[in-house]
Image (cartoon, rainbow, N blue to C red):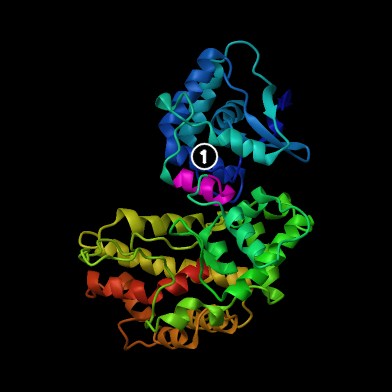
Amino acid sequence: MSYRHLPLESLVINRANDRHGELENETAAIAWLFNNFELHMLNLTKDIVANGQVFEPPLVFPDGEQFVLFDGNRRMTCLKLLDKPRRAPTTELQEFFSEQRTKWKGEFPATIQCQVETDRDRIDDILYRRHTGSQGGVGQSTWDDRMKSNFISRTGMGTSFNVADEIEKRLGDAGMLPHKKIPRSNLNRLLSAEAFRNRVGFSGAKGKFEFTHDEPIVLRALRRIADDLANRYVVLGDIWDIDAKRSYLDRLEGEGLLPTAANSLASKQVAAENKPAVVRPSPTRATRPQKRTSLIPNTIYAIAWAGRIQRHRAIWEELQFHLNLDDHANAISVLFRVLVELATENYIDQTKLATINQNDSLARRVLKVAEDLRAHQKIDQKYVELLRKFPQADSLLSADTLNRYVHSPNFAPSSDHLRAMWDWMADYLVHCLNA
């Protein structure tokens, strides 16, 4: 640990702050803070101006000639906008920061004392022990459930079971441990998100390790991952964010090392038609089925939310947590249509799908994506046949139905039909968002 005075302009607002998950860039991160904590940000700015200082050195990690902020993003955002008010997201905020700058007493700081840490594990340990109270926005804001989830998904810390422990135990029992010591924190980071665990062939959604695919295939994949980490063929910087983790797993998949749909234990044990790839709690006999009030069930969907799909995530969360089907069927039907299109385009963009033509309708695009998913053994042929209904104008489960929800003055959405459409397309959408 060291404390250094660093130029304000060298400090970078973290686009992957655990408050919001990954965003596109620093500008998007600044905008998010004001969209979600505007009153806190204004209060914090006034406090900094009144005192002429910040009371806690920000926590930073060196990145070339710049320093990425891991704690102190709100404070440094306030200082950066006081320094350059035109960087504020709106005209009103630009005027606010210009006015506050005139109230600054003495010389405005060009450098800031920062806590510089070069060990990212230590940074996460520090973050884990902070964030205990907001004090009306002047102090550090307490993380809500989503922020805690972002932190756990990124680092693997705070989960009910330790991924590295479970993997080492199983590799040890199979006589497949590498000769060198596995960097456990890196292994936990790589497989901290359920989406990535599922790709390798196991789940931790129920708080314990469970194979979801054929055990020998999964152990082979885990052995390769353990070898790569133990021999430092893959280091922390190679798996730091969601896209980097996905890229590494894509490489393993390209080498034929990850399990496929043909290795799925569920497909061998359950002959359920059109079953979404979600983890659902097992009801007991005493449990009575409850009517679903939202379009998206309140269950765990294994999606790794990359920065480029934050709007997709916002729509998803509105459909899962905020909009009631009985009260907001029209709004839900429109947002559902938007989510289908955005998710489909994400898959096309990320896979560079060559079969897509510029003039293809949404229905054709969905079908071509489905065929590509089948070709890569992400879904089976039975599900492809279900998705073939999407281009059919005479089918209720179709693109035509979604389009009429948006454009027809006489086609009113039904909550029961919307539920059926979601259950039909959920597996497809999860695969598209994970591309």
The answer to whether residue 20 is above or below residue 288 is above
Hey, which quadrant is residue 249 in on the image? bottom right
In the displayed structure, does residue 59 sit left or right of residue 145?
Answer: right
- State the residue at coordinates (70%, 22%): 111
149 in magenta: yes
Count of numbered labels shown in the rendering: 1
Highlighted magenta segment, given as a residue range: 146-157
Q: Residue at left 71%, top 38%?
A: 119
In screen coordinates, is 183 left or right of 281?
Answer: right
Magenta: main secondary structure equals helix
Q: Quadrant of the C terminus?
A: bottom right
Query: Which secondary structure, mark 1?
Result: loop
Q: Residue 173: x and y, percent?
A: 63, 64
Q: Position of residue 150 (x, y in %)?
A: 51, 48
Closest to the observer: 312 or 428? Answer: 428
Which residue is the site of mark 1? 89
Crowding at mark 1 (Cα within 10 Å: few <14, some 14-19, many 20+): some
Which residue is more in the foreground, 286 or 30?
286
Instruction: Give how far across and how far down residue 49 sits, in percent.
Output: 53, 17
Residue 59 versus residue 363: which sits nearer the camera? 59
Q: Is residue 170 above or below residue 17?
A: below
- Say whether residue 382 is magenta: no
Image quadrant holding the N terminus, namely top right
**What kind of residue is marked 1?**
Pro
Name the spot of residue 85 as percent of width and height, x first.
57, 30
Q: Is residue 199 left or right of residue 238?
A: left
Q: Is residue 318 left or right of residue 362?
A: left
Residue 321 visible in the current orientation: yes
* Residue at 35% across, 80% down: 400
Residue appearing at x 37%, y 61% in the figure: 299
- Can I make out residue 414 in this image? no
